[in-house]
Image: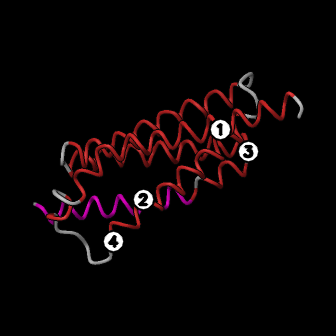
Amino acid sequence: MGNSTMTDILKLLASIIVCQLAGFIGSLFTTPAISTWYVTLDKLPFTPPNWVFAPAWVTLYTLMAISLFLVWRKGLNSSKVKLAMSVFAIQLVLNALWSAMFFGLRSPMAGLVTINILWIAILVTIVLFLKVSRIAGFLLIPYILWVSFATILNFSIVLLSS
């Protein structure tokens, strides 16, 4: 196994760990609230059942990790790569922050503000990733679609609870 192959494997593993860690951090806020507070909220009829969210997010974090890896392997000596990875890091923090706002603080309004900023950060990440690796950018499309759907659900909870 060559040095560059080992480096790629380590970058892929680090990407997976970082992305799944963001999901784990978010779950620390989400899990306790699902069966207590969240079930009491008025939601739209097409809100998915609770069991859908964990596999959906694990899949999305895996796609994010592969996307991050594809950009990272282009090399940190590129300013395009550095900028793309920096914005990726911001959106990943915002992703975990949404769980803290919505579920941790039990504040759909704070969640709504956060998820809108997150959506913009994801869009910017996609645009920047596309400039480095088209595949990396395309791998984030399911993520922005899911967050778009989550934004609609979050917005409806705000409306239905006021």
Of the image marks 4 and 2, the number of the one nearer the N terminus: 4
Secondary element under disc 2, as helix, strand or loop, is helix
Q: Amino acid at mark 3?
A: Ser
Tell me where the magenta segment starts and ends, as one range.
Answer: 142-161
Nearer the observer, disc 4 or disc 1? Answer: 1
What is the distance, in whole Å, between disc 4 and disc 1 at their CAs?
Answer: 31 Å
Q: Which mark is residue 54?
A: 2
Q: Amino acid at mark 4?
A: Pro
9 left or right, relative to 141: right
> Residue at 18% of width from left, 48% of height from top?
106
101 left or right, relative to 69: left
Of the image marks 3 and 4, the number of the one nearer the N terminus: 4
Q: Amino acid at mark 2?
A: Ala
Q: Are marks 3 and 4 in contact (CB under 8 Å)?
A: no
What is the distance, in whole Å, between disc 4 and disc 2 at their CAs?
Answer: 11 Å
- Percent position (x, y) of residue 118? 41, 44
Of the image marks 3 and 1, the number of the one nearer the N terminus: 1
Quadrant in the picture for the N terminus: top right
Of the image marks 4 and 1, the number of the one nearer the N terminus: 1
> Residue at 35% of width from left, 71% of height from top?
48
Q: Which residue is mark 4?
A: 49
Q: Which residue is mark 3?
A: 133
Q: Which mark is residue 13?
A: 1
Nearer the observer, disc 3 or disc 4? Answer: 4
Q: Residue 133 lies in magenta, yes or no?
A: no
91 left or right, relative to 137: left
What is the crowding at mark 1: few (fewer than 14 residues within 10 Å), some, or many (at least 20)? some
